[in-house]
Image: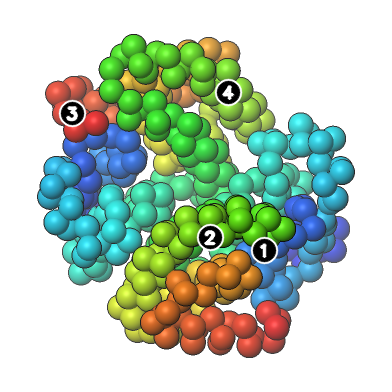
Amino acid sequence: LTMPAKFPKVTVKYFDTTARGETIRLILVHAGQDFKDERLTFAEFGALKPSLPFNQFPVIEIEGEGTLAQHMTICRYLANRHNLTGHTLKAKAEADESVDALNDIVEKIIPIFLTPGDDAKRELVDKALPDLQARFKTLEKRLESRGGQFLAGNTLTWADLHLHHIVHNMLAKCLATEALASCPLLTNLNERVASLPNIKKWNADNLNRNKQF
Amino acid sequence: MSSSKKSEMMTLLYFNLPGRAEISRLILAYAGADFEDKRIEFSEWPKLKPTLPYNQLPTLDVDGQKLCQSMTVARFLANKYNLTGHSAASKAQADEVCDALKDMQEKLFPVALNRNNPAVMKENLAEALKVCTPGFANLEKRLESRGGQFMAGNTLTWADLFLHNVVRMLTMCGGESALAGCYKIKNLNSRVAALPNIK
């Protein structure tokens, strides 16, 4: 699938990690759009920080359009440009809703993700697991009520890509994949996203990246 | 996609306070939309909570289905009533500003909730100002960079309504110092406040 020539060049600026930036990359990768994947150190970020719109990462620079900030806004914008938000207003809202619910889960996972050491992580996961399982179960029921195939609009959207990032990168790194224990539909959806050609290649190519945290 | 049939009236469900539903109420008020502004008492909450898709409020009943998550509901309504600007870029600009405002609003909730406990409120306000002071300074710059009139797409969007919501909350919490030097924001806020349906 070739990109229309008029789509502006995109530069993604984030750390060398997945955390709060990977879904942006997955959207671009799945859409087949070339982009500059800039990964900055903490020191480089510090130097850039005062000039960033909200002093935060990630940001994207869009050729001819300027800088856009806020992780979810960036995802939604790129998803809209690449037809990854569903086909109706309702579908877009379903995608947004699923992403919001996933981000509530991300907030619970982030402290574990940032804790160094597997033993320390395991201890935190043991405490967090019942809550994580309950939250994913709620999402599983929501997915079921929408037909069981996709999180929104009966079609692949950025919400499904975001789910995949959270399961494949964050739960895995936190040794918390049991959070999906009684969620066969979500598990299946995650596997289907993982096997999308561009996503599969991207994940395989990046096995030795994402070392910063 | 909008329906004019009375039988398909939307219901916005929340507590009897502004909180996380106010932005949606402002959008609906500005649009002059027919909707049921349903408010429950705290005593009803324990029974209602488990019946909701994410055990949270607000929710929006639309076309026989329940939509959840406060920002999703607001964005859906903003799109429905043409308050998101006229291009993909302006939608993104509005989203970006609303994300930043949301971060600030979340810090203000503990301040508002502890209004009856001055010591706790003072501490929470100090915490909130750590986010709100640079936050509003950044938004002032953002507003300037976009022409100074509106937050996104050179037209009124839900980002301007949400700005008004958060500024009102900030003022109510005693945090006006965060707006020192934010002349364009103060001007935009008073223009929104003066809109007939908002007033």
Image point (29%, 64%), residue name: A53
Give the image's coloring scheme.
rainbow
Which residue is pictured at 32% across the width and 21% down the height? A173
Discs 4 and 3 carry the same chain letter: yes
Q: Badge 3 sits on which subunit?
A: A
Report the Cα–Cα distance between label 4 and label 3.
28 Å
Disc 2 to disc 1, how far (Cα)? 21 Å
Label 1: how many residues lie within 10 Å, few (<14), some (14-19) or many (20+)? Answer: some
Looking at the image, do the residues carrying marks 2 and 1 touch, with CB atoms under 8 Å apart? no
Percent position of residue A55, x then y: 28, 58
| Tag 4–tag 3 contact (CB < 8 Å) | no
The relative height of residue B172 versus residue A150 in the rendered view (above or below) is below
Q: Which residue is mark 2?
A: B125
- Real-space Cα separation, disc 4 to disc 2, in angstroms: 30 Å
Amino acid tagged 1? Glu
- The residue type indicated by label 4 comes to Asp
Tell me the quarter of the image containing the N terminus of chain B. Answer: bottom right
Disc 2 and disc 1 on one polypeptide chain: yes
Q: Which residue is mark 4?
A: A131
According to the picture, the residue beneath numbered tag 1 turns out to be B22
- Mark 2 vs 1, N-terminal side: 1
Q: Which residue extends farthest front? A: B119
Quadrant assignment for the C terminus of chain B: bottom right
Residue B135 in sight here? yes
Q: Position of residue B80 (x, y in %)?
A: 61, 64
| Mark 1: secondary structure | helix
